[in-house]
Amino acid sequence: MNQIQTENRQHWMSVLARTSLADIQAAWSTLSNKPKYSFLRQPETGLAMIQARTNGSGSPFNMGEITLTRCAVAISNTIGHAFIAGRDKRHAELAAVFDGLLQDPDRNAHLTEAVIKPMEEKLMEQRQTKAKKVASTRVDFFTMVRGED
């Protein structure tokens, strides 16, 4: 897999992981010619350590643990993987299936346009709505300086 393919895959896996279960199920239900797939790793829930950095650029430190669900499926000649924040096994399963399907050159262009782009647009809208809501509650603090005598 070359660099561009890797970046594209990272992008669609990110979108599939962040989208809601309802949206991914809707995409699955509209999919014609649903593939047969088998589990290489059944959806399973576990914990992962999350690292953070002080002020976004300092030394990394272990911030805490997050619940993850992971899944791996085999679809004809590809293997799909998914890691989903939370405990939703169906979400992990469908994300892994879509990852496998998107690796197929014959399906990639269609699925990118029909599934990934609409999900990405919805995620952007949700982010903008949240940013507007947060911005409306912003308080600017300032300090008045007294004259020096």
Image: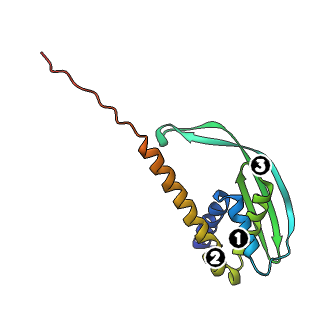
Q: Name the kind of residue labelled 1 in the image.
A: Ala
Seen at 72% across and 56% down, the residue is 83
Q: Quadrant of residue 38?
A: bottom right
Seen at 52% across and 55% down, the residue is 127
Q: Quadrant of the N terminus?
A: bottom right
The residue at which mark 3 appears reads as: 87
The residue at which mark 2 appears reads as: 114
Q: Position of residue 138 (x, y in %)?
A: 41, 40
Viewer-closest of 49 and 83:
83
Q: Is residue 104 left or right of residue 61?
A: right
Seen at 42% across and 46% down, the residue is 135
The residue at which mark 1 appears reads as: 27
**Above or below: residue 8 compared with residue 144:** below
Q: Position of residue 67 (x, y in %)?
A: 73, 44
Q: Nearer the viewer, mark 3 or mark 1?
A: 1
Specify the farthest residue to the bottom.
106
Q: Residues within 10 Å of mark 1 (few under 14, many from 20)?
A: some
Q: Quadrant of residue 122?
A: bottom right
Q: Name the kind of residue labelled 2 in the image.
A: Ala
**Residue 3 can be seen in this image:** no
Q: Name the kind of residue labelled 3 in the image.
A: Arg
Q: Residues within 10 Å of mark 3 (few under 14, many from 20)?
A: some
Determine whether the residue tagged by mark 2 lies in a helix, strand or loop: helix
Determine whether the residue tagged by mark 1 lies in a helix, strand or loop: helix
Q: Is residue 68 left or right of residue 125?
A: right
Tags 3 and 1 touching, CB below 8 Å: no
